[in-house]
Image: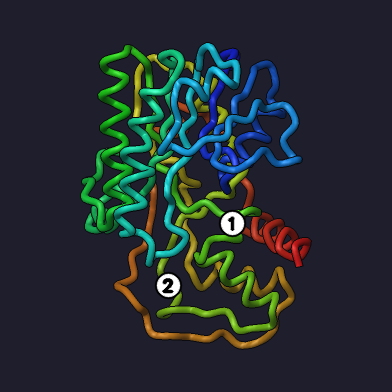
Amino acid sequence: MTQLADVVAVTGASGFLGSHVLRRLDAHGGFRVIAVARSAKPQSVDKAKWLQASFTDISPAHWARANAQRVDILIHLGAFTPKSGAERDRWSEILLSNVTGLSRLLESLPSTPQRILFASTLDVYSPQAFSRRIDETAATAPDGFYGASKLFGEAVIKAYCKESGAKYLCLRLGHIYGPGEDKYFKLIPETIRRVLKGQSPRLYGDGSEQRDFLYVEDAAEALLRAATCELSESRTINVARGESVSVGRVIECIARESGYRGPVDVQPAVTQPISTHFDTRLMEQVLGRWQKLSLEDGVRREIAWFKERE
C-alpha cells in the first residue's frame, strides 16, 4: 500500500460509519484529516480539523476557514441515509442532500482531489438482480428514490473525475452493523433494543431470508484500504463480507449473546423476502484480504455498546 496523501477530507464525519472511519484514519497516522459534518466537533475527536457545514451551504470559504488549501483524497460518506424502509422515498431531503448537496460539495473544494471515494449502496441494484450472487456487472434499477440518488451520485462522480483527471472508487456498501447505529430501525439494532428491554424479538416471515452483514470496523478498514491502495484505474466495487446468513440465525445470535430466553414474536412477512449474496472478488483484488469480525463477535460488541448507554 502507498502512503496516504497529506490531506484527507471525510464528509459525514459524525455519522455512524464516518465516526469509525475517523478513528481508523487516526490510528493509521501520517496525514492531516479534515472532518466535515453539520454538527459541532465532539470531544472524542482530537486530531482531525473539524469543518462544520451542511451540503446546502458549503462553500470555498468554509475550506479557507479550516486552512485547507487542498484536498488530496475526498472520502464522501455524507448523505441522507434512510433509518428505516419507510424513509427511502423521502424525495425532498434525499434530493437536497444526495444530489444538490453533492454538486455543491464538489464545486466548493479548494483543489481537485487525486482520488474520490464515494459511498454508494447495494440499493442501486435491480430487485431482480438478487436472484443470483451479485457482482458489479449486475443490473442497476433502484427500487426506491434513495438508491436512485446514489446511482446518480455515482454518475456525477464519474463525470467529475473524467473532466478533472481524478480517480475514483465507488463503493457499494452492503448491510453494515455495529456500535453507533442506535438511530437506525433495522434488524440488528431493533432486535437488540427489544431483547434488552425484555421484549420478544420480532421476526417477519419464516426467517430464511439471507443477508450479508459487514461489521462497521471492517467497513472502515475497507475505506482506509481504498484510500491507500495502488489505483491504476477507477473502479466501482461491492463492499461486503461475502458471506450471507439467515435472518433467523441473526435473531438467534442476538438472543444468545444477550442472554434472552423468551419466545420470538413471529409476524407475517410485510414484503416479498429478498436474500442478498455478494461477489467480493473484485473487492479483494483491489483492496486485498483481511480477517473480518464474525457475526457473533460483532453482535456481542454491539450489545455491550447498547448496554453502556442504558
Here the colouring is rainbow
Cα separation, mark 2 vs mark 1, equals 24 Å
Residue displayed at 43% across by 44% down: 79
Work out whether residue 228 or residue 161 is closer to the camera in this orientation and state it.
161
Instruction: Check disc 2 and report the residue beneath it.
Output: 208
Location of the N terminus (image quadrant): top right
Q: Is residue 304 left or right of residue 294?
A: right
Q: Which element carries disc 1, helix, strand or loop?
A: loop
Q: Secondary structure at mark 2?
A: loop
Residue at image point 59% right, 43% down: 39
Q: Position of residue 154 (x, y in %)?
A: 31, 34
Q: Which residue type does callout 1 highlight?
A: Glu
Which residue bears the numbered disc 1? 181
Q: Position of residue 175 (x, y in %)?
A: 47, 53
Q: Is residue 189 above or below residue 19?
A: below
Dot 2 alpha-carbon crowd within 10 angstroms: few under 14, some 14 to 19, many 20 or more: some
Residue 1 visible in this rendered orientation of the protein: no
Q: Earlier in the sequence, mark 2 or mark 1?
A: 1
Image position of 64 with respect to 84: above or below: above
User: Eyeballing the image, is 270 above or below 61?
Assistant: below
Q: What residue do we see at 72% from left, 35% from top?
A: 45
Camera-nearest residue between 52 and 123:
52
Three-letter code for the amino acid on which mark 2 is drawn? Ser
Residue 200 lies, in percent from the top left, at: 60, 84
* Viewer-closest of 284 and 268: 268
